[in-house]
Amino acid sequence: MLYVRTEIILESPAAGQEQSSARWPGARLPPLYSQYHEYELRLPQHHWHASSHEAEPKFFFVPGHSRGSGWGNIMQEVLLNAYLAYKTDRAFVFYNYTWNDNPSEDYADYAGKPIPSRIPLTALIRGPIVGAPFPPSEHAPPAIAEQYWHTVCDDRTTSIDREGVHKEIGSWMVEPITRAWVGKLAAIDDQCVAVSDGASIYDWLTFGDRHALHEAWTDFAASPIVTHFGWSPLVELAFDNNREVISPTTVFEPPLSTIPYTSNAERYTELKGLLVLHLRRGDYEAHCNHLAKWSSSFLAFNGLPQLEQFDPPEGGTWGENTPENYAIYRKHCFPNTEEIVARVREVQQSEAAHGLDKVYIMTNGAVQWVEELKTALTHAGGFKHVASSRDLVLNWEQKYVAQAMDMLVGQRAQVFIGNGWSSLTGGIVVMRTANRFHSDTTRFF
């Protein structure tokens, strides 16, 4: 999901970015994040002027990574691709968050509005995934940027046919896929290895199966890809600037962006008293009907066995379902205001919800609907403070990565209620579970 908001913007655009385009007359064009691209290219593991690159580590690249999707979809694949590279002792080749690959088109169209065609990952996240050092106990090679890969490897790449590997696996579960690729790459000594163009390793079948991560979970969660995952300074600054909007404090807390980075769990601690709700709106209603049509279960990242689950109701057949079942799916996937309030009241009865007095609503819903929901929650839940994504004040660069800041908030909530079919919820759930938040604090509508 991409959130494009309409808040007051604090910063002036960079030179040239205030210009509109004939394609979007009158629209202010988004930032292009050039300083983040430049930072990535200056990483110390990039030996641009070396006479030979043979002494460098082995690399692994997935050119067919997902494009043109919301950040939640991209993030889940980035995490698994980086995890696989780590397991093979190869440097992960990280890439942009991409809507449009055409280098001549800096902007893409999203619902009639311009968005950046490519956002560097370092504008969204930090950690070993994007080239930061691994913890001292690890000896894995640091990740490299795609542009460096092309400079070093374009004329000597060994490509592996994805289908040739997967036809022997017989499963779309994460563990057998990872194990097969680790074995395949262990047998290849070439420095520059990529998956054949246009193919991803972990696809929609993997991410759509609630059991897909079960066997791999313990190792995945303990890997530095997760334990040393972090949100970018840009995202953390957005959180700091909106801290009192999101979850007002009663005592001084140092801004997150001033604290030296350590680990995921130590940095993103619980925000006591805060309930976070993730509510997809807009065209998601049609998506929920599609999920009901195919009797879909929760996504893999939301399907960890220690969490509550949704069992598709009986009565549906392949590609068809009953009116009663469509109504059940809608209640969980696209709940109305009354159903949201009822679910909040239900969760408030749990021991994990003791002391909740603030609510933050992650949503792309229309402002009027959000305000009505805030009023309903205030009256029904006894909350002192209710805010939403629509209340944030963001600068021009933060506006286009705001979904990542919402994920940071959800990750730190005392209690989080998400959408089990949403990959954005899934990223939050994985980080909460990996950071050992009690399972009763992570719920679904």
Image: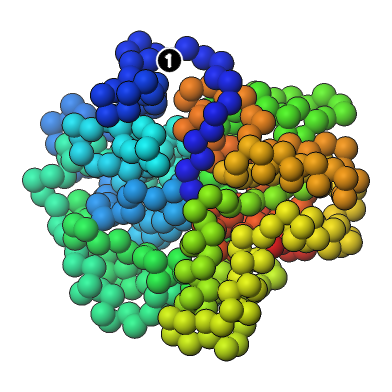
Label 1: how many Cα within 10 Å (few below 14, some 14–19, many 20+)? some
**Whether residue 430 is situated above or below residue 27 in the rendered picture:** below
Q: How many marks?
A: 1
Asked whether the viewer can see residue 349, the reply is yes
Please state which of residues 403 and 230 is positioned toward the viewer in this rendering: 403
Asked whether the viewer can see residue 148, the reply is no
User: Is residue 357 toward the left or the right of residue 428 in the image?
Assistant: right
Give me the residue at 43% from left, 15% from top.
13
Please state which of residues 338 and 176 is positioned toward the viewer in this rendering: 338
Give me the residue at 82% from left, 24% from top.
252
Q: How is the image coloured?
A: rainbow
Give me the residue at 43% from left, 45% from top.
129
- The residue wearing badge 1 is 13
**Whether residue 19 is situated above or below residue 398 in the rendered picture:** above
Q: Position of residue 326 (x, y in %)?
A: 58, 74
Q: Position of residue 14 (x, y in %)?
A: 39, 14
Q: The C terminus lies in which quarter of the figure? A: bottom right
Amino acid carrying mark 1 in the image: Pro
**Whether residue 406 is situated above or below residue 38 in the rendered picture:** below
Q: Quadrant of residue 346?
A: bottom right
Q: Secondary structure at mark 1?
A: loop
The single residue placed furthest to the left in the displayed view is: 155
Q: Position of residue 21 (x, y in %)?
A: 29, 23
Please state which of residues 2 and 189 is positioned toward the viewer in this rendering: 2
Give me the residue at 26% from left, 55% from top.
64
User: Is residue 298 toward the left or the right of residue 376 in the image?
Assistant: left
Q: Position of residue 71 (x, y in %)?
A: 46, 47
